[in-house]
Image (cartoon, coloured by chain):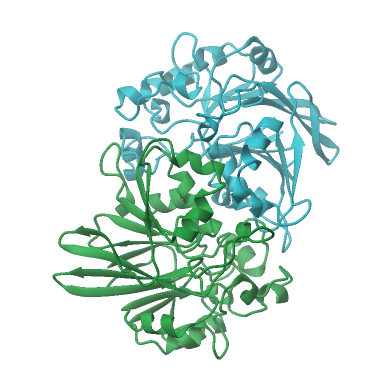
Chain colours: A green, B cyan
Amino acid sequence: VKVRVLGSAAGGGAPQWNCGCANCRGMRTGTVAAHARRQESVAVSPTGDAWLLLNASPEIRAQIESFPGLWPREPRHSPVAGIVLTNGDLDHVLGLLSLRESHPLTVYATDTVRRGFTEGNVLYRTLQRFEGQVTWRSLRLGEELTAFTEGGTTLSLLPFAVPGKRPIHLEGPGALPTSDEDNIGLLVRTRGSSGTRTMAYAAAAAGWTDEMESRFAEADAVFFDGTFWSSDELIAAGLGTKRAEDMAHLPVGGPEGGLARLGRLRARRRILIHINNTNPILREDGPERAAVSAAGVEVAHDDMELTL
Amino acid sequence: VKVRVLGSAAGGGAPQWNCGCANCRGMRTGTVAAHARRQESVAVSPTGDAWLLLNASPEIRAQIESFPGLWPREPRHSPVAGIVLTNGDLDHVLGLLSLRESHPLTVYATDTVRRGFTEGNVLYRTLQRFEGQVTWRSLRLGEELTAFTEGGTTLSLLPFAVPGKRPIHLEGPGALPTSDEDNIGLLVRTRGSSGTRTMAYAAAAAGWTDEMESRFAEADAVFFDGTFWSSDELIAAGLGTKRAEDMAHLPVGGPEGGLARLGRLRARRRILIHINNTNPILREDGPERAAVSAAGVEVAHDDMELTL
């Protein structure tokens, strides 16, 4: 699997437009050892010809331009072979509405996430201008699906349930009941003449289940939710009233946090992604980053590349 | 009026994600004398403290970060005092959904544009999380409205009708009838101790009316629709089937085109904006750009600043 990180920050990016916290201020003025990050999205490809995007961030245009592998090779063309939605959060779906230049799209999502985006959404009509503009392919929990083959290597997706929640705009009175399909993890797998390689992807996770543990055990690399270091990160900084768990994110720190869990996996690469602007792991010279490194875990950054 | 161009390209930006035309290819590889441009949006301010954004492009996050004047000055803060929508096209409104960090927003739009964005749009619920999250202020054609005052200088908006059309996603069967409120121009005016200054803004115009002519006559600077050089620009390049007029844009070239019209105005600055990726005026060394300059007209670029 060829992997390119197009964005590694949580919703809002880092810095965030209305945030003047120490990290955001320091990133803007270059006075902290932390790099700015676009909102989370990762491109994967069997051999580097056609690519699937994991999530469609609002910044998708700049993200496509940031990576020559995604540049058109003809007057009307795109190496983007499809987009996979891991949940319906706006920072994962809004970018679809920026791909509206009458270009056929293939979008992979659970039926729940598809319906949450397409129903009652007049803006979606911009992607319904001709028959077949969007082809939806249903992701079903536990069922592996072949996306495409290039150069004799096949790329497949195996979705699995990850604790999460519905997107904020679908909560509240009249909301549908929550579902295992609201938020998923993926095994992205290539099979070719050089064997099988597997990447696990769970950019949002409210907890850690036995199923996740066993899926991650199959992976050469694991991307995992790095949103918050601690439960009360926003509260302690005076920037919000919600705990990490209220927003369906397992904190990175703590005895049963994401870092401790990742540290016990045998995958060759274990990488935190979807990092909130307030997270102290953004600081390359801080104790939290040192703890991440000491556990053999990495912090995703924009433009990071992996080959599995 | 202090003015900062946050983006100067038409919808899709330049380069555009799925376009490999000569301009897009050349901008990506640095082989043409043309600069990349984000999607159209302009910030205006009385004295540089608080700013109104004219249109909310999908790239709003990067645009805010591109200009220190828009950076937060407190842990939770934004110098963005409001957003003005000149029509309901997705490249003008989608950015609102990226300003969803529970921050109160003031949005100026005609009732038609407001309804087109807020009705039947489940995504808008992200901006309805608390009472007063968005304050809508109605723009009424021909009625001047005071936005705010800072340092003794008042900034006002005077909307006027400009030929245009409904956004694509609101066209088709069941669509409401078109209205003069679908697409507007603005006089942005400051009044203070140093007198009155006026900027005219019409980033999308399907034609040129007597009313536009008389509004523009009041302005020290005019920003005007620079989408296409010629009617058949997309057709001739093999990139589309629609003429400029089908997309409600007066071409820049030709005896009664935007350039000829602008050249006859007495405003000190006359500036083309909302420039499509295919437009030959993007090439700084081409004959079309030379014709623009010869007429005393400018081509907007990202990060351009004016003080009127």
Q: Residue at x 58, y 52 (%)?
A: B65
Q: Is residue A57 visible?
A: no
Front residue (pair B283, B258): B258
Q: Position of residue A12 (x, y in %)?
A: 58, 59
Q: How many marks?
A: 0
Above or below: residue A278 compared with residue B87: below
Q: Residue at x 62, y 75 (%)?
A: A244
Q: Position of residue B220 (x, y in %)?
A: 68, 22
Q: Is residue A273 visible?
A: yes
Above or below: residue B171 compared with residue B160: below
Q: Residue at x 63, y 56 (%)?
A: A17
Q: Which of the 4 image quadrants contains residue A44?
A: bottom left
Q: Position of residue B53 (x, y in %)?
A: 66, 40
* Image-based side of A277 in relation to A52, left or right: right
Q: Position of residue B40 (x, y in %)?
A: 54, 36
- Indicate the quadrant containing the C terminus of chain A: top left, top right, bottom left or bottom right: bottom left
